[in-house]
Image (spheres, rainbow, N blue to C red):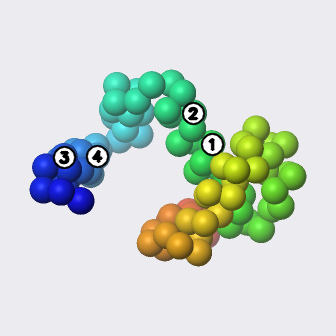
């Protein structure tokens, strides 16, 4: 990533790390994203959680309304991603 893009990314994530409550996080993302963008992020995260639970595409499609293409893209995160999403989802599931 070019220098300017890297600085923008760093500034945004540094700000996110400073959010101190659930409400503040919601407010920040409500200001940053459109409703559709938030819905897409939330849907992808729910798809990832369901994939981590071993659910099948048809069940995920029914429960989330996600397309098979979206589910496939999210599934690739588990094989080609950094591993962070899988780690965080598993930690969250262990606490539940």
Depth check, front residue: 61 or 29: 61
Quadrant of the rendering where the C terminus is positioned: bottom right
Location of residue 2 with respect to 30 vertically, above or below: below
Q: Report if residue 48 is visible in the image.
A: no
Horizontally, residue 79 falls left or right of residue 5, namely: right
User: What is the secondary structure assignment of the residue under circle 2?
Assistant: helix
Label 2 close to label 1 by CB (< 8 Å)? yes
Label drawn at residue 43? 1
| Separation (CA) of disc 2 from disc 1 | 6 Å
Disc with the residue nearer the chain's start (2 vs 3): 3
Judge left or right: residue 68 versus residue 76: right
Residue 16's disc is 4
Crowding near the residue tagged with mark 2, few <14, some 14–19, many ≥20 C-alpha atoms within 10 Å: few
- Image coords of residue 71 (percent x, y): 69, 54
Q: CA distance from mark 4 to mark 1?
A: 20 Å
Nearer the observer, disc 4 or disc 2?
A: 2
């Amino acid at each position: 990533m070019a220098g300017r893009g890297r600085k923008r990314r760093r500034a945004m994530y540094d700000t996110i790390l400073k959010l101190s409550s659930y409400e503040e996080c919601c407010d920040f993302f409500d200001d940053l994203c459109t409703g559709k963008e938030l819905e897409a992020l939330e849907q992808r995260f729910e798809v990832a959680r369901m994939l981590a639970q071993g659910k099948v595409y048809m069940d995920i499609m029914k429960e989330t309304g996600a397309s098979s293409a979206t589910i496939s893209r999210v599934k690739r995160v588990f094989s080609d991603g950094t591993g962070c999403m899988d780690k965080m989802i598993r930690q969250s599931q262990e606490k539940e």
